[in-house]
């Protein structure tokens, strides 16, 4: 099993910054990628950013140039640095981890979520 513990959410004014952290523990071998999703009230969960095991990153168009995902392999932790925050970034942010076993079966794990609120 894999456990993901997020931290760093909170309330910030528009234009401000926050950094989210997600610490992974447990059976995290054969890691494929780690990333962040978010879900705003009344909306579907959407991908924010992902970092693949080789270090490649991908971002949603809405956060490109403002958010940066990074990973500390020694700490099994992924970060999401969020700058120039906008009210529309308000959502619950979820950390995810995907690993693949020797048969090619993928397993996706989710954190409990952390609230980010951006006031105008």
Image (cartoon, rainbow, N blue to C red):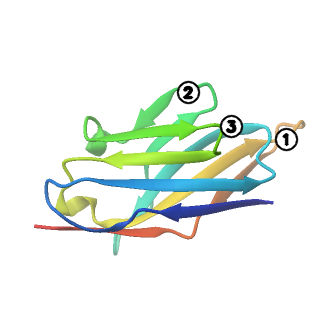
Q: Circle 3 is placed at which residue position?
A: 32
Q: Earlier in the sequence, mark 1 or mark 2?
A: 2
Looking at the image, residue 84 sits to the left or right of residue 67; the answer is left
* Residue that appears at 81% across and 51% down: 27
Q: Quadrant of residue 29?
A: top right
Q: Quadrant of residue 52?
A: top right
* Residue that appears at 44% across and 40% down: 69
Judge whether 105 appears above or below 58 on screen: below
Q: Secondary structure at mark 1?
A: loop
| Whether residue 46 is visible | no
Rendering coords of residue 53 (x, y %): 64, 31
| Quadrant position of the C terminus in the picture | bottom left
Q: Earlier in the sequence, mark 3 or mark 1?
A: 3
On residue 101, the disc is 1
Q: Earlier in the sequence, mark 2 or mark 3?
A: 3
Q: Circle 2 is placed at which residue position?
A: 55
Assess disc 1: are there few (<14), some (14-19) or many (≥20) residues with their C-alpha within 10 Å of its C-alpha: few
* Residue that appears at 83% across and 37% down: 104
Q: Secondary structure at mark 3?
A: strand
**Real-space CA distance between mark 3 and mark 1, rounded to the nearest whole angstrom:** 10 Å
């Amino acid at each position: 099993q894999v456990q993901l513990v997020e931290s760093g959410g909170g309330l910030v004014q528009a234009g401000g910054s926050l950094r989210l952290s997600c610490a992974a523990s447990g059976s995290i071998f054969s890691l494929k990628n780690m990333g962040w999703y978010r879900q705003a009230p009344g909306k579907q969960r959407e991908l924010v950013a992902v970092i693949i095991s080789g270090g490649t990153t991908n971002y949603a168009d809405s956060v490109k140039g403002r958010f940066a995902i990074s990973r500390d392999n020694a700490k099994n932790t992924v970060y999401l640095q969020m700058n120039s925050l906008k009210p529309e970034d308000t959502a619950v942010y979820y950390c995810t981890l995907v690993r693949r076993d020797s048969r090619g079966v993928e397993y996706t794990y989710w954190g409990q979520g952390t609230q980010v609120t951006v006031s105008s």
